[in-house]
Each structure stands twice: as C-alpha cells, then as structure tokens.
Amino acid sequence: MKEAEIRRLLAANLLCVFTIVLTAVVPAFFWDGFTILGTHLAWLCICSVCVSTLNIILHLVLKPNLTPKRSSFAHKISRFLKCCIYFFMSCILFHAIIVLYGAPLIESVTETFLFAVLLSTFTTLQCLCMLGPNIQAWIRVFSKNGAMSIWESSLQITTICSILGAWFGAFPIPLDWDRPWQVWPISCSLGATFGYMAGLIIAPLWIHWNRKQLTYKSR
Amino acid sequence: MQRWPVLLFLAWVCFLFFAGIGLFMSGFLLTRIELASSSSCSDPFVPPSWERQSLPPGSCWAPQRFSKAVLVIIDALRFEFAHFNPAKASPRPYENKLSFLHHLVTSQPRHARLYRFRADPPTATMQRIKGLTTGSLPTFIDVGSNFATYAIQEDNLLAQLVQNGRRVIFMGDDTWEGLFPKKFFRSYFFPSFNVKDLHTVDDGILQHLYPTVDSGEWDMLIAHFLGVDHCGHKHGPDHAEMAKKLTQMNEMLRSLVEHLGNDTLLLVAGDHGMTETGDHGGDSEKEVNAALFVYSKTPLFGTGPPEEPEAVAQVNLVPTVALLLGVPIPYSNIGEVMAELFSGDGDAVSAALQQLLVYHINAKQVDRFLHSYSLVAQDLPAEQLQHLQDLFSGAVEEHAQLLAQVQRPTLVPPELESRLGSLIGRFQLYLREARAVCTQSWARFHPLRMVGGCTLIAASCLLCYMASELATASDSFYRSCLLYPLLWGLVVAVLLGLAHAFTQNGLDLLLVSSWAAAASQLGFFWHWWGWHPKRARLVGSQPPLANVSLRQRLQAWLQLAFPMGILLFRCGAMFSDSFVVAEARVAPFLLASLVMLLIGKLHWDGRLTVPEGPKQQLLGFSSYRREIWYLLCLVAMLLVCVRLSSFFHQCREEIPQCRPSLFLSPLASLRNTRAKNLFYLLCVALLAGLVCAVRSWLRHYGNLNSSDPLVLFVRWGFPLVVLCIACYWAVASSADDSLGKLQELVQVAVVAFPWAVYGLASVGLLLLLCNPMTVFAKDTRESAGSIVTPYLGVPSSEVDFLHVIPQIYKRMQESQKSCLERGGCRATVAAYGLGSVYSAALVIALTLLGFLLMLLHSERLSLAFLLLFLEAFVLLHIHTRARGLAGDAEPFSVPWYAVISWLLAASQFFYSTGHQPIFPAIHWNAAFVGFHLDHSTNLLPAVLVGANTFASHILFAVSCPLLLLWPFVCEMPSSQRKKPKKEPREELQEVEEHMMEMRLRESPEKFSIALLQLGLKYLFVLGTQLLACVCAAMILRRHLMVWKVFAPKFLFESLGFVVSSICLLLGISLVMRVDCAVSTWFSQLQLR
Ligand SMILES: [Zn+2]
Ligand SMILES: [Zn+2]
C-alpha cells in the first residue's frame, strides 16, 4: 500500500517537474522571441497557470485526502470561492512580505506581484488542494510530526523548498556581474522554481528512505 | 554579587581584541602625514656659483630643457608588455606587441630609452596616480587636512605647472577628476568604473588626442588609457583580447610620435603591472614591474642604451619632469632625478657638472622635506635621519669645494672627472637611502603582523565562545580562567619590558601588548584544559547527564545552527565587494530572515499552536492565543520598521543609480518653507512623543514616583532638553535667512543651545551615576510583617501621589524614627518601581544618549533614531514573547538569536542613520555642533564625529543588558496565566509573581554570571564579524577594490568594534552600579 502510494506520489511530482520544464520550452515554438529571461513576466504567468491547472487536475484525479462526508453542491461552491479568496489573500500577503524584505515599493509592482503569484502557486495552492480552506489543518501540517500522510509530508517539503529557493535567489542580486538574470525578480523566481522542483524530486525519495520512521497518526 | 571579576573579565577580553586589531592594523594600514607646504620658484635651491648664470626665461630652479611634454599613461603596462624580444619564436599574446617602441630604441638610440618602472605598493591606480604626481609614497591613509574628498592636498606636479602658468590638458580615466579638481586647462574625462568595458575610455581619448596635440594650445598633455588594465581584470594578460589592446596602443604611439614637435618630451608609463590573473594592488614582482619609455625628437642621452634596461623608481619621474620643464620640484617629493636626461650635448665634464646641479637641487629639496616631516611626525627613525643629514651635508660641502676649484682651472680633466663621478655617487647614495628610509616605514605590508593580528582576533573569538559556554560563579572559574591568564600576560609583558630595557631598544608598546595578549590567551586555554576535566568529572558523577547520546548532542548543534547560520552568511558577505557595497540591504534582509526563522522554528516546534489537553484549554486558551497574535503583530511591526529604515540611506559611488535619501540634508537646505516647517514640526512632535513614551513607560512600572533628583530630572529635565533641541533646530535651520540685526543673536544661539543640551545631558548622566535608584518606598504599618516585602507595581491613585509625596515622605521618616525608638519592630515597606529598577536606569541613560546623538545628526535623521528606539523595543518584546512561548528553562541565559538580531539591528541602523563605511560619507559637520569653526584640539571634534558615525553602535551596545532584563520586566502576564488564582495562599503568590527584576537579586551569583555570559556572547558575535572583515582585507589585499571597499570597511568595522565594546562595558557597569545602589538601599532598610 505504502509503496504504491509513494510511487504514485513520485509519478505526480515528476509530472509537475516535467510541466515546469515544458513551460520554459514549449512557448518558444509558438511565440518568436520567447525566453525565460527576456519575456520573464509572460513566463511567470504561463508557469503559474500551468502549475495550478496541473495541480488541480492531479488533485481531482488522485484524491489524496478522502473527504469524509459527501457535501452539497452549494457547499462545494462556497468552498471553491473560499479557496479563491484565500489564494488571492496569500498573493497579497506574499507581496507585502517581499516588499518588506526590500523589494522596490512603487517601481516594478507587476513583477513583484507576479512573483508573489508564483510563490502562492507553489505553496498556497498546494495547501488549498490538499487541505482545503482550513487554516487549522495548515497550521497542523507545518509543525513537527504534523503530517498525517505521505502527501502532507510531500507538501511540507515542497513548500519549504520553494520558499528557501526564493530566499537564496535573492543572494546574487547585489553582485556586480551584470547578468540578465540578476534583474529583479528573475533570480528569485528562478530560485523559487528550482527550489520547488528540487522539493518535488526530494520529497518521494526522502519519504522512501525514511518510510520506517514515518508512522502517521490516523485522524 | 561578583562585580569586579565580571568587569575585569570583559575588559580583558576587549583588550585581547584591541591588541589583535592594533597588530593587524600596523601590518596592513600604512599611514603617512601629508604636509601642507609647497615649493615655489623663489626657494633658494640653486648652488651659489650658478646663480650668476641667469636661468632662461620660464625656468625655475634649473634651466628648462623642454617646453612641452606628453605623458601617456597606459594603465597596468607591465614591463613585459613593452619589452620587445625579436629572438622569441612563439610570443605569448602580450609579448612583442609594442614593436614601435623597439623600433625607436634601435633606430634612434640617443633619442629613446626603455626603463623598468618600479611601482611602490600599494599598486592601486589611485595611489599610483598620487605617487606619479607628488613624488611621494601614498599610503592608504594620508593623514591630511581633509578626509572628505579624495582630492590631492599635497604639493604636486600639476599644481606646480598650473602655479607657473602652464596649461595642462587631461584626457582619460575620470579618477583624475576627483584627484585634481579644477586643475586642468581642458579635460576629457571618461568613466573608469566599469571594469568590463574595454573601449570607452581608450576610444574617447583617441578621438581627442591628435586634434589636441596639433592645436598646440598646451604645455603638458596627459592621456590615461585604461583598456589594458580592464582587459587584464576581465580576461587576464594571457588572452587574445590583450594582444588586440596592445596592438591598438602600438598604433596609437606610432601616430602620436608623428604628431609631436621637436621641443616635446614624450613619456609612456604604466602605473603598475599585473599578476598572472590580471589583478594588482599588492607588492609582488609582477605587479610592481611596470614600463617607462622616454622619447624626444631632439637627442636626449649622451650615450647609447645599456644592454639590459635600467630600473627606475616610479617616484623618480616627478623631479625629472619638473626640472626638465623648468618648474620647482613638488615639496614632498622623495624621488631622485634621472640624471642621464640632463647630460645635454656637451663634453663629459660639462655633462657631469650639469648632472651635479640637478642632483644638488634634488638633494636639497629632499633634505628640506625630511626635515619638515620629522618635525610633524615621528615615524621615521631618528638615527637614520641623522645619518642621512650627515651624508647630505658632506656631499653639499664637497660640491661647493669642487665648484670653487672648477672656477680656478687647477684640476686636470681625468682627476676632475673621477672626483665629479664620486660626488655624483655620493648624491645618489643620499637620495637612495632617503627613499629607502621612507619606503621602509610607508610602503610595505607586514605579512607576519597581519597574520598575527588575525590569529589573535580568531583566538579571542574562540575564547569568548568557550568562556560564555562554561562560565560559572565558582571561585575556581575566575582563578583559572581570569587570574592565571592575566598573570601569564603580565609576566610576559614584564619580561619583554626588561629585555628592552637591557638592549636599549625603543619599546614598541604595540608588540609588547600583543605578546602579552597572546600569552594570556595561551594561559586561558592551558588552564581551561586543566580545569575542564574536573568539571567533566563533576558532571560525570551524575549518571543521567553523563552519557549524553550522540543524537542529543547533534540536536544541540542543530539548535545552534539556526542563529549561527545567519551569522555565517553575514560574515561570508564581508568577502565580496558587491556585498560590502550592498550591506545596507544585506543586514536588514538577514535580520528579517532571522526573525522569520525564529517564528518558523517556534511554529515547527508546536509552540504557536494552542496547547492541547483539557486543563489548560479552560484556563489559558484565550490569553495564550492573544499572546501568539501579539507576537505575530510584533514581527509584522519589526518588518515594517526594517523596511522604513531604508529610507534614510546614504549612497556610495559604486552604485551610480543610487540617490541619497532626502532626509540626510539639513533643514536649512530646504527651499520650500512650508515643507521645512512641516518637517520641523514633525521632528519636534516625534521627539516630544519619545519623551512622553519614556515617561509613561517609567510611570507604568512605578519608577516615576520618588522625589529623587534623578526622577525630578526625568520629569522636568527631559522636556527641557527637548525644548533646547527644538530651539537649536529652529535656529540652525533658519540661519541662512537674512535676519539683519538678529544675526549676532543667532550666532550666539547656535552655540548656546547645543551647550545647554550637552550640559543638561551630562547633569542627567551624573545624577544617574550618583543615585540610580528610581524607587519610591512607602511604609505601611497596617500589615505588620517581620520581613521586608517589596511590593511592586503601580500605585492605585497616581495623581494623588504626585501631590502628597512630600507629606508621605515626612510621615515615612517619622514612622521610621518611631520604629527605631520602639526597637525591633519593622514595618512592611512598599517600594514602587523596584521591579524595574535596572531597566529604568538603562532606559534613562539611553534616552539621554539618544538626545545627544540626535543633536549631532541633521534634524530629519531624528526620525531614524525614533525608528531605532521603536525597533529595539519591538525586538526586546519579540525576544521576551518568544522566550515565554518557547518555555525555556533557563531564564538567566540570553539565547544566541537575540544577541545576533541585536547586532544585526545595530549594523542596520549604522546605515539607516545616513552612514556608509567610506570616508567621503562621514558627517564632518557634526564636529561643529555647538562650536564656531574652530577647535583648539583634535580630540573634541574626533569624539563628536565618532559619536555621530557610531551612534547606533553606541545605543545598541549600551542597551545590550536589556536583553537579559526585559523578560523579567515583562514577566507578569505569562506567570498569571500559569497560576490559577483559586489557591489559598493567594497573597504570597501575588508577591512572588511580581518579583520581576528582583529575581535577579535573589540569586546574585547567577545574575553576575548572566551578565558575563551576555557580554561574552555580544563580544563573540562582534568579534566574528570583525574577524571576517580582517580576513577579507588580508586575503583580498590584491583585489581591485581593496582600497576603495575592503580597507575602509575594515577600518570602520574595527573602530565600531572598539566603540561597541567600550559602550558594552559602560552599559554593564551601569547595571552593576544600580545593583550596588539596590544593595545599600536594602541594607539601610534592614538596619531600620
Ligand atoms: Zn592602474
Ligand atoms: Zn586595474
């Protein structure tokens, strides 16, 4: 059972990684002059949209958390709206935090906001898919021994990795190398993306290696 | 409580660091004093017998040989680049490219010559330009009249040319613009900053060079090409680009020579060489070995070139060019003329006489310089100066004799020639020895001292860490970790002193102190080794602690990794020039990350979720939740503070697109009156707000009730200080307006108000020292207890107390008297403000210091200071809450993250008070707050400017003990939560709950150790940053940016360390002073 689930997780994560790689490559065929660095904002949009659609589809297909009770259609709608609001709020929150960390306040607002959207896609959207608009559950997952399934462990790892990646991505900005990728927010968004991809790959492996220690409490 | 050992220990550690800094600095930073004098045409330097021969018009000191000169500086032209070896079969990319020079030398041997041009370290372009124009050996710090600009203040070749009416045209590297403002007749500057750009400067010069040469409207033309140097930095010398660049230079020289006239001297020089990687700055052979090429269309030399090109010191260019062009040699020149350029066309004797003349002038000038230099500075050794003096006077005397004999033709030519030759040799010897003496003390790194200083600092850091981990209050700790090491150090110092006394050498205090420091460190480690096993055995006797498993130890290390990782990032950032330049953004980034990580870690450990379990949920659910929200709000506030502080940044020239903050300029410079008034009102209102906040804080903790002079000062003196500052700002910001008759009054007021603030603040600090108790004691005899119980907190009816204080005070005295008469009866004493007596004293001191420092800054920077106080307050609260939520068992030890965040905030506010670690960014006008434009000594302005520069270091270091005290001050809410109130012994518990800082008094030993540990941790973190700076300066001393970025950073960091450590000691001793006062207060109570 566990092995099979890990394999499913690995497949899903690899699909995610593959999608991100595709978002970098495929648009160039349809759109002349598309590069990640040159038309960064477009790539940010494409990447966010693709990753979120894929995540939602995967969530619908795999159903990692079995909702205990059947709910009405209205309930589902309200749940969906709540998710949207949460996502938007998380974008705003990320934007605020990024600005507080030193991003320009007025110039390049679009860049900063799209970067916040990307980060939200990598972190909040996953949480919303996995846990729904339930803050208590989020708080539980992101604490020691809080994860209750391998999906939640994977969520922990990918979220932490993307945020760490974005954090490390800020490091090359002050260097005087004059590279195109040092422009705000390219290095940070690339860092977040690489962090996310690394998290996606690390998560199944880590779970596989630690499967003896990982014993999940039942709800 | 052991007060003196703690202070002594900290002072000793500070001394260890200081010795390390001093040792490193003496090896790394070479200093020299700039003389303000300059040579003039009328200086009597020409030997008497020559005076009769009138000089040709336009000549000073010696006859002019050329009316024009072209100086082509090819940056980083190594000798190997210019040398041409036709025998070479397969030349490297940089070899055999300047073939035109070789062509000139071989085809016109008496017109052209190539020299090895020996540059003096430091081989950085700016220092070399200084050397090439002043004829001196510029060091990193040329202590001159003005730090604020890079402009050359010393007498130099360009100044002499301009002074004598010559037109100087410059084209090329814009470094010259800063060095010689307004000296050029015409100039074409091109940006030199971008090292990646190989062509802008060179192409710009080539565009203007030939038309300018042809126009003939110049006397000296300087062209400074940068392409070769930039190519070296970008690609290294062994690269095809370098071949292209050198070929371009070759073509440039070829066409330049075609454009030259017969009366023109051409000099092609490299300012320094480059290493195999294309860098320069140090003193290795490849960096020092540049090329010099001399050419003119009229014959220059008496003989053909020697086999192997001669080596010429770089400073020799200045006197040579000066005398060839007929202008005086710059005052501070220590170079020697290149005599073969003066030989002319005559026979051997007249050529030798001509050479002797220039040598004579040169020697006299050097002698005059050495004499005046030895009057102002002592860094040249006296006995060597005496020796030089003897050499000089001997040679001059013989020259006079010889000249007299030449007049009367008694000597036969061969004998005359040999005597002339030997005399030339004596002059040369004198000049060379003089230069050697100067080089010895100005232009040499001392690697051994640098490594020694580095090691001392590193060992001190290690010592701090170890001592902070194992400090205990036991006597054996102080004996083996303080007393014995001190004795070791003392013994070594005395031994060295004796050795010096016997060998009669001058006592080098720095060396002695660093040896003593090293010895005492060794002593510490030795005794620590001996003492440690004992402790281990003690621990070993307790079985559960004995075998700490590997996993636990690993976990302890991981715990440490969280704050230390941030510190490591900070230290690593010191090794990159970009990060040092961008440090104003790095420090806040790391601070924000540290706090976020702290929150993340708390959450990860499950401290931020509401505890499960039915019992607590009933009682503490809501308060706990409130606590968490409070913490999150605090973090948000901190982030906002950090972000806001970036509005006060100063710029440095490395970031061209940066605009300095508007708030840095004084209000007086604002044109818009309305904006001026608004800003003024805002500043004053916020200042008043600060006073209100401090007073309400004190009142909240009951420290504002007594009628001690200190409390009265806080009540009335603080507003008065604010009033004075406001008046000063008003006067200073409107000083420019034409006030007519009031002008004199304004002049007085501008001085009087700052002095009033100085006076009031020092009165306040004195009061604080004399009686730091802000406790109001009240005798209540209703409930007669046998022991003294301090009741702490807020008096119920605040306003009543203000009116009845004197009466109560009287009544108290009476009751005490009656008590004494009755004997044995002791009343319960209620003491207001005892629980925060330590912090109250610190807060008062900090406020006073804050006023002083705000006065030294421009008006609108007071906003930055308020932000500083707010951020410090928020940080303290975050620290307290985080501790409360983490539930640490040890209340007496301050965690590492708190200390590191405190220091990060300190360096963040160094930048946010408008400072940068570069000399032009220093706020020099701070020296004139309260003074008209004169200072009798240098000490006072240095103190004022230093206080201005290190304001945030001072405030954060003094307030460091608050990190220990604050959790005790704020302890009430958390303890209330824990204790349900339905127990019978309610009253007793109440008392216990409100102990606050008196918990520290309960266990004085622990208190003193806690202070010691806090001080050591602070010094450790400071020291680690310093160590990173020192290592960066040492390792990167060849780096392009060493004199622009790393060396100033090191200097500011080490000065900041000195200031911080002294202020830390002051802060801790203030706490000790309060503790003394509290002790006497208690003993007096006991006596009654
Ligand atoms: Zn150079
Ligand atoms: Zn260079």
Image: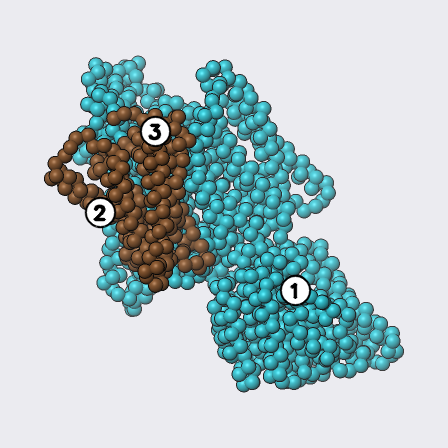
Output the letter for the chain in brown.
Answer: A
Measuring 73% from the left and 80% from the top, which residue is drawn there?
A: B107
Give the spatial CA distance, label 1 vs label 3: 65 Å
Give the spatial CA distance, label 2 vs label 3: 35 Å
| Residue occupied by mark 2 | A88
Co-location on one chain, circles 2 and 3? yes
Measuring 36% from the left and 24% from the top, which residue is drawn there?
A: B889
Q: Chain of mark 2?
A: A
Disc on the earlier residue, 2 or 3: 3
Would you say the residues marked 1 and 3 are in contact, meaning their CB atoms lie under 8 Å apart?
no
Q: Nearer the viewer, residue B690 or A170?
A: A170
Would you say the residues marked 2 and 3 are in contact, meaning their CB atoms lie under 8 Å apart?
no
Amino acid residing under circle 1: Arg
Colour of chain B in the image: cyan
Is B609 situated left or right of B919 in this image? left
Mark 1 element type: loop
Mark 3, residues whose alpha carbon is within 10 Å: few (<14), some, or many (≥20)?
few
Measuring 27% from the left and 32% from the top, which residue is drawn there?
A: A140
Measuring 24% from the left and 48% from the top, which residue is drawn there?
A: A92
Is residue B928 visible in the rendered image? The answer is no
Q: Nearer the viewer, residue B653 or B836?
A: B653
Quadrant including the N terminus of chain B: top left
Disc marking residue B92: 1
